[in-house]
Image (cartoon, helix red, strand yellow):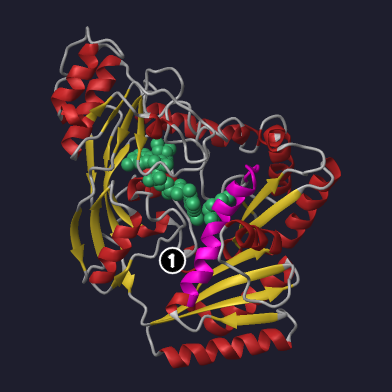
Amino acid sequence: MPPAGGRSTEVGSPGMIEALRAIVGSAQVLTDDIATYAIDARKKYFGKPLAVVKPGNTAEVAAVVTLCAAHGVAVVPQGGNTGLVGGGVPDESGTQLIINLSRMNRVLEVDPQNNTMTVEAGCILQNLQETAATHGRLFPLSLGAEGSCEIGGNISTNAGGVQVLRYGNTRELVLGLEVVLPSGQVWNGLRGLRKDNTGYDLKQLFIGAEGTLGIVTAAVLKLFPLPTATQTAFMALGSPAKALDLLTLMKGRLGERVTAFELVSDFALSLVEKHVPPFVSPFAERHPWYVLCDLADGRDAQALAADLEAALAAALEGELITDAVLAKSEAESQRLWKMREDITWAQVREGRNVKHDVSIPISKIPQFHAAAHAALEAAYPGVRPVVFGHVGDGNLHYNVAHPTATHSEDEWVGREWESVSRIVHDCAARFNGSISAEHGLGRMKREEIRRYKSEVELSMMRAIKAALDPAGLMNPGKVL
Ligand code: FAD
Ligand code: 2HG
Ligand code: ZN
């Protein structure tokens, strides 16, 4: 579709807004009361958008992007705006247009035999989990923000979550994509194929690109059989090293049935008890660390429970764990998982902290943890690390709360942010780790990554960006 309004339509001019209205309808171009779209989930970035456009289908997205390309208007794709690195909000210039995909929330097809589901980008993750379940299938992507994040955002951040151990990252759950390119052209790659060796696997470029290469408008997702039996165990233990030994034991005895294996430090648990009542630890005593583990199976529940109990007995016998509770009902399991998901909110209530999302080879986690703790304590005596996360994937949220005796919360997340992050990121790099395992770079880590990626790697990334988005209008200022 040719750009409406012609070349004379200036950024921010009434002509541009009118042209957008002509494409999506007046009600879907928002210019007033749009602050909630412009502030990121952590309230770190306060952007100023030109406007927010809410297209209803792929053709409208393509027409909006074509118009913007013709007039040099930068666009910021946005889903549920739950991202944690400021990737989905515009800068403060007032010239960037938010394209919010939330209205594109239709499930286009469920194919239980092919074990696939074709969906629009604005579908809320939890709705997709529920849709899959109504067809006797599992869509395994699962994370704390699942009630509001959207699949287009999950794809664009290659989201991880708590079931990566068994099912992989979002990257492994996507078979096909439809994308509106920065030129406004539509690439229809909505193929539900598990094997396709016809050249470069282009969809992988857009997965994890954080909206810098194009706008994902639809996807073909992989489904799995719905488990018939599940079990949840919450275990107390002495150290991260014990957690790794426990993981080896559990995987050895229970194999693929271990779907989630999350580490929680006692400080993280105590923050949930303090700030998110009525949760209280199920253990009578305090322990330094805990692991929350889920098992799933397609066979009978009693056999799964018996295998889990035998594994726990072996773990107690081998002194890997000091105590354990098994959830006796679905409600108990949900309570434990809510505690895990509430860690994010409990931290906010305790005071903003400096967050990290590192990954390290699993075997190196104990050394990484010890090194990071020692380096932080040396620089900031009394520092309070809030450590938890997807230890089964080598991914720790090594968040750091301020030492109350020496720093205020504002000083900590203002003046000290960079130096605290540098300590943790340098430690991850020392063990050949990554500074972002799942949240991405967005705006927050775009400068920081230059310290850790080689020039060769960065220049390949820049070349891909330049090839697909030569004018640099697709989510500028993010990632690169
Ligand atoms: P947004 O925040 O809207 O956007 C994220 C990025 O993707 C931005 O760069 C945006 O420009 C781009 N984008 C969005 N939609 C599109 C599209 N259709 N096409 C192209 N680009 C697009 N993340 C994890 O990985 N694992 C977790 O366990 C996890 N837990 C979380 C828990 C909480 C409580 C919160 C608040 C966040 C959590 N996150 C987690 C981070 C966040 O939920 C994920 O990054 C999620 O995938 C983002 O989806 P969204 O729809 O909110 O995307
Ligand atoms: C999680 O695993 C999320 O809960 C959020 O990735 C982590 O709050 C955080 O730092
Ligand atoms: Zn996480």
* Residue 417: image location, x then y, percent: 68, 35
- Please identify the quarter of the rendering in which residue 129 is found: bottom left
* Residue 287: image location, x then y, percent: 73, 71
Which residue is located at x 27 percent, y 15 percent?
Answer: 71
Circle 1 packing at 10 Å, graded few (<14), some (14-19), many (20+), is some
Q: In this view, does 43 lie above or below 297?
A: above
Helix, strand or loop at label 1? It is helix
Instruction: Tell me: 11 left or right of 386.
Output: left
* Residue 118: image location, x then y, percent: 23, 56
Q: Is residue 289 above or below residue 60?
A: below
Name, please, the residue furthest toward the front: 278
- Please identify the quarter of the rendering in which residue 66 is found: top left
> Magenta residues?
332-355
The residue identified by callout 1 is 167
- Please identify the quarter of the rendering in which residue 104 is found: top left
Name, please, the residue furthest toward the top: 8
Amino acid, disc 1: Tyr
Which residue is located at x 53 percent, y 70 percent?
Answer: 336
Question: Chief secondary structure of the magenta span?
Answer: helix
Q: Does the magenta stretch include residue 476?
A: no
Quadrant position of the N terminus in the picture: top left
Q: In this view, does 45 lie above or below 165?
A: above
Q: Does the magenta stretch include residue 335?
A: yes
Q: In this view, does 341 lie above or below 446?
A: below
* Residue 302: image location, x then y, percent: 45, 92
Which residue is located at x 57 percent, y 46 percent?
Answer: 436
Instruction: Tell me: 91 left or right of 252.
Output: left
